Amino acid sequence: MDFVITIDSQADIPLYRQVYEELRKAILSGRLAPGQKLPSTRYLAQSLSISRATVTQGYEQLLSEGYLETTTGSGTFVCRRLPDDLLDTAPVESKPQVAGSPISLSAYGVSLTERSLFRLPEPEAQISFSYGRPAFDKLPLDLWRKLLSRHCHANHDVLDYTNNSMGYQPLREAIAAYLSRSRAVKCSAEQIIMIGGSQQGLDLITRLLINRGDWIAVEEPGYLGARRTFLAQGACLFPVSIDESGLLVNNLTTNIKLIYVTPSHQFPTGALLSLPRRLELLAWAQKSGAMIIEDDYDSEYRYGERPIPALQGLDQGNSVIYVGTFSKVLFPALRLGYLVLPHNLVDVFTRAKWLADRQSSLLEQYALTDFINEGHLERHIRRMRSLYDQRRQTLVQSLFSHFGDKVKILGENAGMHLMIKIHTTLSDEEIVQRAAQVGVGINPAYPYYLKTSPGSEFVLGYAELNEQQIQEGVHRLAQSCQRGKESRSQTRQVCAEGTATGKKMSE
Amino acid sequence: MDFVITIDSQADIPLYRQVYEELRKAILSGRLAPGQKLPSTRYLAQSLSISRATVTQGYEQLLSEGYLETTTGSGTFVCRRLPDDLLDTAPVESKPQVAGSPISLSAYGVSLTERSLFRLPEPEAQISFSYGRPAFDKLPLDLWRKLLSRHCHANHDVLDYTNNSMGYQPLREAIAAYLSRSRAVKCSAEQIIMIGGSQQGLDLITRLLINRGDWIAVEEPGYLGARRTFLAQGACLFPVSIDESGLLVNNLTTNIKLIYVTPSHQFPTGALLSLPRRLELLAWAQKSGAMIIEDDYDSEYRYGERPIPALQGLDQGNSVIYVGTFSKVLFPALRLGYLVLPHNLVDVFTRAKWLADRQSSLLEQYALTDFINEGHLERHIRRMRSLYDQRRQTLVQSLFSHFGDKVKILGENAGMHLMIKIHTTLSDEEIVQRAAQVGVGINPAYPYYLKTSPGSEFVLGYAELNEQQIQEGVHRLAQSCQRGKESRSQTRQVCAEGTATGKKMSE
């Protein structure tokens, strides 16, 4: 055991006394816990470059005062029962020190202290319709473990600093081929940079393209994680409304530097950006000189609808940065995503990635390469698509059978969540609270609006829940909404508790 | 296989013709490669929501024109030998498109385009004294694989988004206990945030504390990765010289917002910051209101010298952010490090971590927790310390026996590298080139200086090399330095090639 104490051979205090004082302080401050074993006198003497006799003398003083005890053949330990009076005299240091001038944060740091940027975590619920989570019990984890093991050996490359912050070349090639096949993205591996999930991508894009005060257009309603990133970096947000064909491109103005869109499955409404709107958006970007962030977070799952090529593949003018992730297809804790960049941005993003964290996990990049190249990814997606399709249908049927014409369902043709609009006199908070009271977690859509939300909209993720849970969850939700209003005060109280003990944060 | 093409049922062109045109374009542009299998007509029809007969008609047209071929029982494929005249008519899209207005970068982005920020990669050498790399063949990889496997199962927590961007609580507790024992760092788990390696830590600290134009004091010479981060974010650098007791604290002035130090083993000189200087530095920080970044990148390896407590543990005034990493102790591609923060900075760093990449790899955090708590970490460090100690002694002896009094050795009492100063008339570039010519890679120290370097200084890492390689490397280095100057022009040529094919970047 390494144990560091401060010894000053120039000081007037004898060395054995310094050993004694330092150890005593360590015991009293809790750095050495009752029952903890001390290093041997020989070891400590060596590591402090002092004589063993000196250390022994220090130890003996502590033994005689009751701080230490010995057990024959086992060594010296901190006494399990320290006399109370010893502890009383301790110079207590366990409380956080508050001293020095208050720390002055950067402009970025100050932005982050604005509470409004971050939502409260969702309460944990028995049946949680949280979005963005896959069917954990259907993941090919045995295979994933095998692939990790396959590469976790003394091949320096997988363990070393990489010479290329863009990521593992064969993985980038596999992704380029996959994107070309399945999303009509036109790119070579040289345009792909591996990142630690799409959040890192949004952060890097904003850092590299946006100065404080620049305008970013965002979908209204839209994804909070992106909005937070933009606001933290001082951008001004220009909300653009959504209809059933996606973004209302006509509403865009000039002076916009960047636009963030989720065209495959708009978050949260689920709208699919139509082909004419896509072409219109690209033409606008070309004309205005704006860059487009195309966040294709769950495009793998389409149910029956005709696929529309990615904006990136339709683009003729280097206007699109495509953001992809494996967190939805595989699992959220796999921090691997990618950016597909116009050629003229590759160098600066590679450098920014180096400065951000040098490289993403190589072991996982190697495993993922095999996962794609051996056909597992597309097989897994097919399997999940059919599973999620069933779950989606179950959810839609349950909603109609319990809410009838009081519910409108949006964006159910793709992805892992849908949005509902309920005809009700209850407020959004009341509905969330009533649901929580019967063990059901749902996300209201109002936080996704920059301007006033129309209300009564909720986002329901279904990928993680089995059919029985979905049916039961909708049943309870419907019942809780139909209950009389007399129980309202009680509801509030339960919810307050739920919030306090809440843990999961969907976003 | 998913395959996306654009079909517009509103268009005047018949659908079968659209299928034909789209596939033909895909073949000619290389999106569909020769020999590649096409989706079945049934599958494609379904995914495009058109009739199978339409797709079949499109396929048949392509077959008759020689773009496709069929193999009975296997399906339809892109023809392996496309007639040249077909390819000649192709609308070639393989070249990067250059169109639209040039992209305007943010101030941060512009900083990154300054070439001087990034060095050329080191050429790969047969015997490379590169620093920061462990003895890869002595790593406990079987154990590491076992620990990864142990946690890679359907426990949602390890696969899911975390509710706490600070990192896995038991790991942070294990690190707090370890730091208290071995580095006299005083902290609780609540002050520790897991990060993706120390580079991410430096990036976050700079973002949160530094505005463009703020002053940061750095060691002279000092670590390039930190300097790059500071410069990219617009800081002004104030270099502070080093002597054998570390940083010359007296030279510090006011108006400094942040100071970056490597007190355990100054990079690159290897100086250990003495206790009086530490106390002086802390007093200065308290008085001036500056924050100290204590980068303890390889403090685990000390050889005989008395350990000095970390600045963090000596600090009375919330002035120190301690940065630690597992990249040196385990392996560089393990992107796990940590920050120990003053209490008043924990919240804002947690938010910044969320915005940067939400969370670091949970699977590796779980494995690392067991690695520490089951005693493997400290055992591994002990084993490596004795191994590196031998290698260090071999290097020191080899240097003296080959260079005699023409070499001065600095900073050999700790870490995984030392610095040498050679008495020679050759320039640094000549020495590096001559070494490269005989298959030896060494890093000159001049890039680590902001001001003029004294020259003839080199950094030699030894942890990765066995004793034979070290002896052979020093032998070759000495011989190449002693060679006459007539071979110089030849040397240059070889080096130029070396640089062109070079791959590894130490920093």
Image (cartoon, coloured by chain):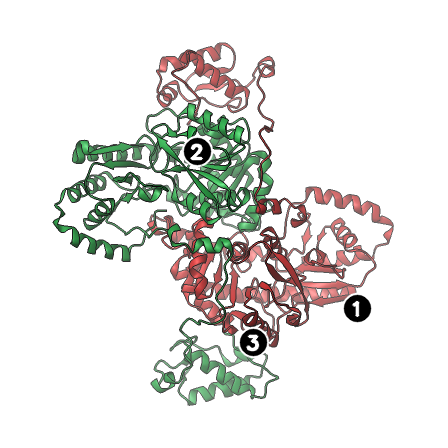
Chain colours: A green, B red
Specify few, some or many for label 1: CA neighbours under 10 Å numbering under 14, 14-19, or 20 or more: few
Which disc is residue A375 wearing?
Answer: 2
The amino acid at mark 3 is: Ser
Residue A364: percent from left, percent from top: 47, 45
* Label 2 secondary element: loop
How many angstroms separate mark 1 from mark 2 (CA)?
62 Å
Q: Can residue A74 be seen from the camera position used here?
A: no
Q: Is residue A470 left or right of residue B259?
A: left
Residue A255: percent from left, percent from top: 51, 36
x 59%, y 88%: residue: A12
Q: Nearer the viewer, residue B366 or B47?
A: B47
Q: Are marks 3 and 2 in contact (CB under 8 Å)?
A: no
Q: Nearer the viewer, residue A14 or B199?
A: B199
How many angstroms separate mark 1 from mark 3 (CA)?
30 Å
Q: Is residue B181 above or below residue A21?
A: above
Q: Are marks 1 and 3 on the same chain?
A: no
The amino acid at mark 1 is: Asp
The answer for which chain carries disc 3 is A
